[in-house]
C-alpha cells in the first residue's frame, strides 16, 4: 500500500507548510501550557494525520513506510510534542492491530483511529520490565468468555487521551519468557482500568505519559489480538521494529530543525568583528552535524524501502534508531555550543530541543538495546 507519487508530493508540501506556518509559531504556547492546543489537534484530524499508516480500506491514508518516514521527518521540524499527539496511533499503538488483528477487531477500532476520533497507546513497559520486556508481569487469566487483567504499565504515552490500548500481558504465568505473553486490544473505559495522572518529565512538554493500572479488569475473550494466545511478545517486537524506523525519522526531522537554528545563529551572531559562522571551528561543528543528518536520513529511507519490499529489517531498524537518536543528541549539543551562553537560556529554542531529544535515546529501546540487537544479529548470521 502506498499513495501515488503526485498525491504524496502534494501532501508532503502541505504538511511542510503547515509545520512552518502553524506549529512553529505555537511552540511557545505548548511549552508554557504543557498542552498541544485542541484546534491544532483538530487540524491534524482534518489533514488525516492520525490515519497515515492505516490502510485505505479502514479509512486511513495508507502510506508505505518510506512515505511515512518522509512525512514524519517534515512534521518533526517543529517541537516533538506535536508529533507525539499522532505518534502512538500512527506507530506502536495501532500497528499490532494492523499486522495481526482479526477482521472484527480491525473494524471495531481502525476506522475511528484513522479519523482521530480516538487515539491508541502501546502498553508494554512495566515498573520492573523496561529493556527486559519479556519479563513483564501483568497477567491476563482466562475465565470463561473473559480474561481478567492485573498489573501496572508504566510511562504509557497518550494513555490519558487513548480510546484503545494494545496491552501485552502474560496469559500463561507458568511460561516465564516471551512465549507466555499475549496481546489484547482493550477499551480504556473498561471497569478496572485506572489511568494515573501525567508524569513530570525533563522535556517534550505537551506530551503526556502515565501509568495504566489494571485491577481485576474483565475483558471479553474477543479482545485477544489475532485470537491467538502466546503471540503478544512477537507482535510487540515486530511493532517495535517498524516503530524504530518511525522514530529514526522523528530524530532526523528534529535534527534538521536544530541544525538550522545553529546555522541561523552562526550567520547572525557577531564576535571578533564578524559573524561567528565565518570561523572554521564553528563551521566544523556545523559540518559534523550536517554529515550526521545526511547519513541518518539516507539510512532511514534505505531501511524503510527495504521494509516496504518485504525484507527482514530488525537489525537495520536498530542501526537507524541507534545512529539517528545518538546523532540528534550530538547535533543538539553542538547547537547549544554554537549559541554559547545564549544556548543555555530558555529564551532560545535550542535549550528546549536539547532536553526534548534526550528521550529519543531511551524510548522504544535504549541505544544499548539497539546495540544488543545488532550485535546478536551479526553473531547469529556468522554462526548459522
Ligand atoms: N521480530 C520477531 N520476533 C522477535 C524479534 C523481532 N524483532 N526479536 C525477538 N523475537 C523473538 C525471538 O526470535 C525469540 O523467539 P523464541 O521465543 O521463539 O525463541 C523471542 O522473541 C525472544 O527473543 P529474545 O530471546 O531475543 O528475547 P530477549 O528477552 O533476550 O531480548 C529484546 C529481546 C532485548 C530485543 C527485547 O526485549 C527488546 O526489544 N527490549 C526493549 C524493549 C523496548 O523497546 N521497550 C520500549 C517500550 S515501548 S516505548
Image (cartoon, grey):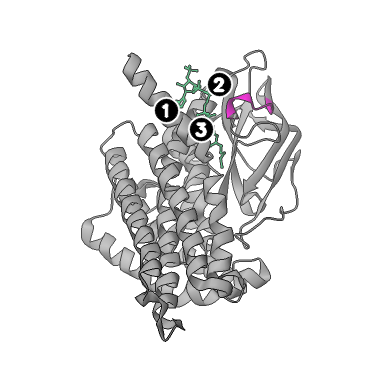
Find disc 3 in the rendering and name its residue.
Answer: 236
Earlier-in-chain disc, 1 versus 3: 3
The C terminus lies in quadrant: top left
Pointer 2: residues within 10 angstroms few (<14), some, or many (20+)? Answer: some
Q: Which residues are magenta?
A: 133-139
Q: Is residue 32 left or right of residue 92?
A: right
Task: Classify mark 2 as within 8 Å of ligand 1 or not, answering yes or no.
Answer: yes
Q: Which quarter of the figure has residue 266?
A: bottom left
Element type where label 3 sits in the image: helix
Q: Residue furthest bottom?
A: 273
Which disc, if any, is residue 149? none
Find disc 1 in the rendering and name its residue.
Answer: 375
Query: Nearest the camera: 229 or 379?
Result: 379
Query: Nearest the camera: 281 or 66?
Result: 281
Q: CA distance from mark 2 to mark 3?
A: 10 Å
Q: Examine the structure image and report whether residue 137 is included in the region drawn in magenta.
A: yes
Find disc 2 in the rendering and name its residue.
Answer: 178
Query: Nearest the camera: 88 or 135?
Result: 135
Earlier-in-chain disc, 2 versus 3: 2
Identify the residue at horizontal 62%, vertical 14% (top origin). Answer: 175
Amino acid at each position: 500500500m502506498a499513495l501515488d507519487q503526485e498525491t504524496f508530493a502534494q501532501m508532503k508540501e502541505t504538511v511542510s507548510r503547515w509545520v512552518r506556518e502553524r506549529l512553529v509559531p505555537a511552540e511557545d504556547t505548548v511549552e508554557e501550557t504543557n498542552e498541544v492546543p485542541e484546534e491544532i489537534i483538530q487540524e491534524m484530524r482534518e489533514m488525516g494525520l492520525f490515519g497515515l499508516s492505516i490502510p485505505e480500506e479502514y479509512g486511513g491514508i495508507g502510506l508505505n513506510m518510506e512515505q511515512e518516514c518522509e512525512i514524519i521527518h517534515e512534521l518533526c521540524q517543529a517541537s516533538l510534542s506535536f508529533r507525539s499527539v499522532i505518534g502512538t496511533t500512527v506507530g506502536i499503538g495501532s500497528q499490532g492491530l494492523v499486522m495481526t488483528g482479526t477482521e472484527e477487531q480491525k473494524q471495531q477500532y481502525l476506522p475511528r483511529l484513522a479519523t482521530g476520533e480516538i487515539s491508541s497507546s502501546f502498553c508494554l513497559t512495566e515498573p520492573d520490565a523496561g529493556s527486559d520486556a519479556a519479563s513483564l508481569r501483568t497477567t491476563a487469566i482466562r475465565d470463561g468468555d473473559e480474561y481478567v487483567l492485573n498489573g501496572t504499565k508504566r510511562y504509557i504515552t497518550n494513555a490519558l487521551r487513548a480510546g484503545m490500548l494494545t496491552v501485552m500481558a502474560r496469559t500463561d504465568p507458568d511460561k516465564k519468557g516471551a512465549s507466555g505473553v499475549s496481546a489484547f486490544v482493550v477499551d480504556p473505559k473498561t471497569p478496572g482500568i485506572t489511568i494515573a495522572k501525567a508524569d513530570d518529565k525533563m522535556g517534550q512538554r505537551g506530551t503526556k505519559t502515565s501509568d495504566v493500572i489494571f485491577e481485576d479488569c474483565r475483558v471479553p475473550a474477543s479482545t485477544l489480538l489475532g485470537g491467538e494466545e502466546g503471540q503478544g511478545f512477537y507482535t510487540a517486537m515486530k511493532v517495535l521494529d517498524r516503530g524504530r524506523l518511525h522514530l529514526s525519522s522523528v530524530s532526523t526531522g528534529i535534527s534538521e530543525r536544530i541544525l538550522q537554528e545553529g546555522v541561523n545563529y552562526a550567520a547572525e551572531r557577531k564576535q571578533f568583528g564578524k559573524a561567528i559562522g565565518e570561523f572554521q571551528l564553528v563551521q566544523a561543528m556545523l559540518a559534523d552535524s550536517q554529515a550526521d543528518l545526511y547519513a541518518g536520513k539516507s539510512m532511514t529511507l534505505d531501511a524503510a524501502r527495504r521494509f516496504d519490499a518485504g525484507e527482514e529489517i530488525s537489525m537495520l531498524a536498530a542501526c537507524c534508531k541507534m545512529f539517528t537518536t545518538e546523532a540528534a543528541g550530538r547535533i543538539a549539543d553542538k547547537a547549544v555550543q554554537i549559541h554559547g551562553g545564549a544556548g543555555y537560556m530558555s529564551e532560545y529554542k535550542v535549550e528546549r530541543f536539547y532536553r526534548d531529544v534526550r528521550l529519543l535515546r531511551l524510548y522504544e529501546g535504549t541505544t544499548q538495546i539497539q546495540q544488543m540487537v545488532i550485535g546478536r544479529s551479526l553473531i547469529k548470521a556468522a554462526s548459522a
